[in-house]
Image (spheres, helix red, strand yellow):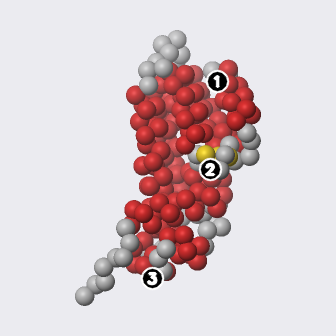
Amino acid sequence: MPRTKQYKEQEVVEKAMQLFWRNGYETTSMHMLEKQMGINKFSIYASFGSKDGVFLESIKCYEQQLNRLIDKLEKSSNGADGIKEYFRDFLEFSKDNGRGKGCLITNTANEIGQDADEKIKKVLTDFLKRVRTVFAQLLEQDRTKNLELIAAQADYLIISMFGLSSASRVFGPDQMENYIENIFSNL
């Protein structure tokens, strides 16, 4: 007879997500996951298969939490100003003890190498494509822009989002606001 789980999977995944977000994928060990999640290695392997399995579930959890910001962005009729608001909303979303933790997706993309698990690389790429697509849709609200310019500006904004995410881990609110204003002065 199989044993019943003594934990709620969503709760332990959220704890793992916070650990990965704070420490990074590579630095996070199975021992750290056991301690953070409050379950033993056997339970982790039985539920998730591996560290990669826990991480992939953590990414899903992260995306679910970030979806409220992306949904708001998708519904915006404010073009580039809506994207600027998303940048500011993201900074608030990623705060931890007064500083930003960055973006779990960006942090991971910055640390994994070419030999990383293909499933992990695909999840990261798919997420970034989704956000870039939404940026392009909002930029299309400006009827004076052609498709080539919209594509170039959407690329510029997703790369700027990477910079924003990384910088939020180090710089203060005034510097981040200056960064955002400078990004959008170039559109």
Q: Residue at the location (71% across, 43% down)?
A: 167
Relative horizontal placement of residue 174, taking residue 69 as reference (left or right): right
Number of marks in the rendered image = 3
Q: Which residue is mark 1?
A: 184
Q: Which mark is residue 96?
A: 2
Relative horizontal placement of residue 184, taking residue 139 as reference (left or right): right
Q: Which mark is residue 117?
A: none
Q: Residues within 10 Å of mark 3 (few under 14, many from 20)?
A: few
Q: Which mark is residue 42?
A: 3
Q: Nearer the viewer, residue 114 or 41?
A: 41
Q: Nearer the viewer, mark 1 or mark 3?
A: 3
Q: Nearer the viewer, residue 145 or 111?
A: 111
Measured Cα–Cα span from mark 1 to mark 2: 25 Å
What's the residue type where badge 2 is placed? Answer: Asp
Earlier residue among tags 3 and 2 = 3
Q: Residue at the location (50% across, 28% down)?
A: 136
Earlier residue among tags 1 and 2 = 2
What's the residue type where badge 1 is placed? Answer: Phe
**Residues under numbered marks 3 and 2 in contact, where contact means CB atoms less than 8 Å apart:** no
Q: Nearer the viewer, mark 3 or mark 2?
A: 2
Earlier residue among tags 1 and 3 = 3
Is residue 22 among what the camera can see?
yes
Residue 28: percent from the left, percent from the top?
61, 68
